[in-house]
């Protein structure tokens, strides 16, 4: 999704540069046009460069995560507002595809699109406890990675109510584990489509 913002920013910047070049080269090509007729090119140049800057900032600061915070938007009302409702709705919709491996660990095998994935639910009651080195859930990520290998899954999902710490998120990304919060469960439902 980051590429979408960066490519839009690049297109805006190129269009702005093209408008600036046209403004600069217009008197050379047609010397009898007045500068007032070409003022729109300056406005286009400034607008495109500002748009490019805005899109780059959105890419840098993670515009994809902002959508979860904008609950007041009309198109975001189609999903239930409570993250636990979204989780239970996902579990109900995919009950035939889910097989619970361990009731105590909330570990599921998810058979979808002719592949099997591992899903680990971390509910607020079963939250990880911080470790002295500040890594927090890194040990649980390692356990999930080992279980992923044990069940021969290509993908694993870590679903939790709270965000995962940075070190654990980096380890998860390198291990093929996608970390999602309950309010982002729509991304997991799109995988099955």
Image: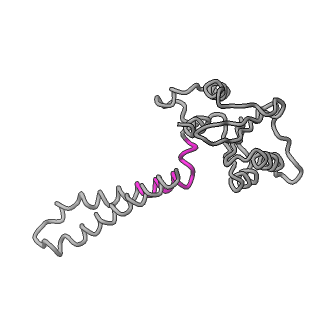
Tell me: 182 left or right of 8. right
Res 82 → quadrant:
top right
Visible residue check, residue 163: yes
Count of marks, rendered view: 0
Q: Relative to the observer, which residue lies in front, 116 or 144? A: 116
Vertical comparison of 71 with 163: above or below:
above
Res 112 → quadrant:
top right
Q: Is residue 54 magenta?
A: yes
Q: Relative to the observer, which residue lies in front, 88 or 146? A: 146
**In x, y percent, where is residue 41?**
25, 60
The residue furthest bottom is: 28
Task: State which region is magenta.
Answer: 51-66
Vertical comparison of 133 with 112: above or below:
below
Q: Is residue 183 magenta?
A: no
Visible residue check, residue 69: no
Residue ID at (51%, 27%): 77
Q: How is the image coloured?
A: one colour
Residue ID at (17%, 72%): 27
Vertical comparison of 131 with 89: above or below:
below
**In x, y percent, where is residue 14?**
36, 63
Q: Relative to the observer, which residue lies in front, 34 or 140? A: 140
Residue ID at (68%, 31%): 98
Magenta residues: mostly which secondary structure? Answer: helix
Tell me: 134 left or right of 84. right
**In x, y percent, where is residue 158?**
71, 41
Q: Relative to the observer, which residue lies in front, 82 or 192? A: 192
């Amino acid at each position: 999704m980051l590429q979408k913002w960066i490519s839009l920013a690049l297109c805006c910047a190129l269009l702005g540069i093209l408008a600036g070049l046209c403004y600069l080269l217009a008197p050379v090509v047609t010397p009898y046009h007045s500068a007032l007729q070409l003022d729109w090119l300056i406005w286009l140049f400034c607008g495109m460069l500002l748009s490019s800057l805005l899109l780059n900032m959105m890419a840098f600061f993670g515009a994809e995560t902002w959508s979860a915070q904008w609950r007041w938007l009309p198109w975001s009302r189609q999903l239930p507002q409570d993250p636990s409702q979204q989780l239970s709705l996902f579990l109900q919709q995919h009950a035939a595809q889910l097989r619970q491996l361990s009731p105590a660990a909330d570990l599921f095998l998810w058979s979808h699109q002719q592949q099997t994935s591992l899903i680990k639910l971390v509910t607020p009651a079963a939250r990880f406890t911080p470790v002295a080195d500040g890594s927090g859930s890194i040990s649980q990520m390692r356990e999930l990675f080992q279980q992923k290998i044990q069940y021969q899954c290509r993908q694993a999902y870590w679903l939790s109510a709270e965000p995962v710490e940075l070190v654990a998120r980096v380890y998860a990304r390198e291990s093929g584990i996608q970390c999602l919060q309950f309010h982002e469960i729509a991304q997991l439902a799109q995988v099955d489509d």
